[in-house]
Amino acid sequence: MKFKLSLFCLSILIAPASHAFDRITGKDFASRSEVIAQGAMAATSHPLATQVALDIMKQGGNAIDAAIAANAALGLMEPTGNGIGGDLYAMIWDAKTGKLYGLNASGRSPLGLSYDTLKAELDKLGRSDLPPHGMLPISVPGTIDGWFEMHQKFGNLPMPQLLQPTIDYAEKGFPVTELIAYYWNRSVPLLSPQPGDFKGSFTIDGKAPTKGQLFKNPGLAYTLRAVAKDGRDAFYRGEITRKIDTFMRENGGYLRFTDFANHRSDWVEPVGVDYKGYTLWELPPNGQGIAALQMLQILKNFDLAAMGFNSPDSLHVLVEAKKLAFEDRAKFYADLDFYKTPISVLISEEYGRERAKLIGPRAAQRVDAGNPNLYEGDTIYMTTADKDGNMVSLIQSNYRGMGSGVVVPGLGFVFQDRGQMFSMDKNHANVYEPGKRPFNTIIPAFITKAGKPLVSYGVMGGAMQPQGHVQILVNMVDFGMNLQEAGDAPRWQHLGSTEPTDGQDAYLKNGGYIEVERGIPFETVRELQKRGHNVRHGLGGFGGYQAIMRDHTNGVWIGASESRKDGQAAGF
């Protein structure tokens, strides 16, 4: 029997499976359409958390209420990336005042742990830097205080109503999703030996829950019930605090009741730079957000659109800009209460223009921090939006995966290990000191245009975050992608830059290396290698993107969710 294949059918047979021929945009990497809704929108890394946010807004809550409720749910359902033992940062667009507000809800190091005592503890371990697990890298958890700050300033529904969905899921159980199950399984062997009850709280018969398996956390339900009943003081000045204090004293930890009682979050002014008519807003240090702004001030000196998406020229310039910004990040970003980072100079057009002159035709192998004084210096991301025009850009983390591994029996959460980000160089801006906030990687982002709110977004994941923020913005502004396409597009990340944990005199010595996702053309990779770049293909680690955009013309919300994660954007 003879038959003929049309050219179209033949192309389907021989094309890679990843090509999406039904996408009207023609972009092979586009995974799905944007989500569009008139009333409200939520985008989180877990579908059930997204539904919690929408339910709260259907009950009369606003975007701030929804963000708190969804974040609580994520702490239960995605403990591999966040929880009430970690820190929180947020940017909130308040429709009533027409203003963008910033919140730094990160915690500080123990007041009773001096530099010399910490150094002696590290010497016992044979280390020159802080370890990723155990008692030494633990700082005060800032998340719950952050919730109450947001709620007091902007909230609508009572806090018990916002926490009840998570309490119910913690008591009755929730099904574990695929990617979270994978990372959970990786964490269990590392964290089970740590002091406390990690194994009893976060395993089922000693093993991580598998995909689809129901998991319960009665300890977290207990803690959240206390917080719902007695407010933030239940965690920072109450019975829970006393239990933490006792546990730390008995197990060689340094956090005390006083550390919790003295904790405060800070409302801060976001800082922004214009990029071709769009303003990207970030929070000032101790976070790394201004690295994205520094990159943009460098990139505006080049015509990326003319170079082309994922071309050798555009990727070369993007990577070199990252190298330059990250050397400044390593040297100058620290807690502003202890070190006056020269923010206005670092993110200025003049400084960006001078740094841009350092980008040549080949990959830079040695890169130093600039001298700004000459010019005068695993995580979750989620976003919500409501019918009144309020928007929340929120990021929250335990730092490395499930954090320190330290769990106080009966409380149901893991303490973060963010203190690992301190430097032990006494001359460094980010040197360890008691009562100091360590350098922090988690950063929310926000875009305005002509003074109006446009996009609330983030790309969680360590040093990938500033790089991801820039890639998303460039994808939309320079390469004309929509909100979902901008996140689906193949990503790159540069690794090997100097870190804020290194010494004051450290610098990038060997050029570092680039990891690229499948989808970056082979021709581009080959040309980058010719220019002296060390290019590798990465497997994961390219961030977790969620975004909401305001369509002012049609009066609707547009949502996008990371195709690399378990999440969902949804609205009504």
Image (cartoon, rainbow, N blue to C red):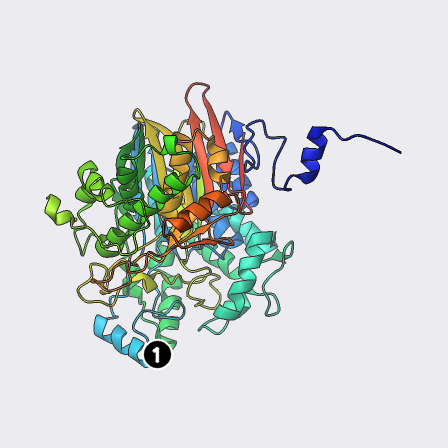
Q: Toward the viewer: 550 or 172? A: 550
Please tell me whether residue 315 is drawn above or below residue 308 in the rendered image.
below
Mark 1 neighbour class, 10 Å CA radius: few under 14, some 14 to 19, many 20 or more: few
User: Which residue is under mark 1?
Assistant: 125
The extreme bottom residue here reads 124
- Which residue is outermost to the front? 530
Figure label count: 1
Residue 141 sits in quarter = bottom left
Q: Nearer the viewer, residue 561 or 49?
A: 561
In the depicted structure, whether residue 111 falls above or below residue 304: below
Residue at 45% from the left image edge and 47% from the top image edge: 525
- Name above or below for residue 206 compared with residue 94: below
Q: Position of residue 84 (x, y in %)?
A: 42, 55
* Frontmost residue, 297 versus 103: 297
Where is residue 21? Give x, y as percent.
63, 32
Furthest toward the right, the residue is 1
Is any part of residue 161 visible from this angle? no
The structure residue drawn at horizontal position 39% and vertical position 61%, both measured from the top left corner, is 416
Looking at the rendered structure, the secondary structure element under dot 1 is helix
Q: Quadrant of residue 381?
A: top left
* 321 relative position to 32: left or right: left
Dot 1 amino acid type: Leu
Q: In the rendered view of the protein, which quadrant contains the C terminus?
A: top right
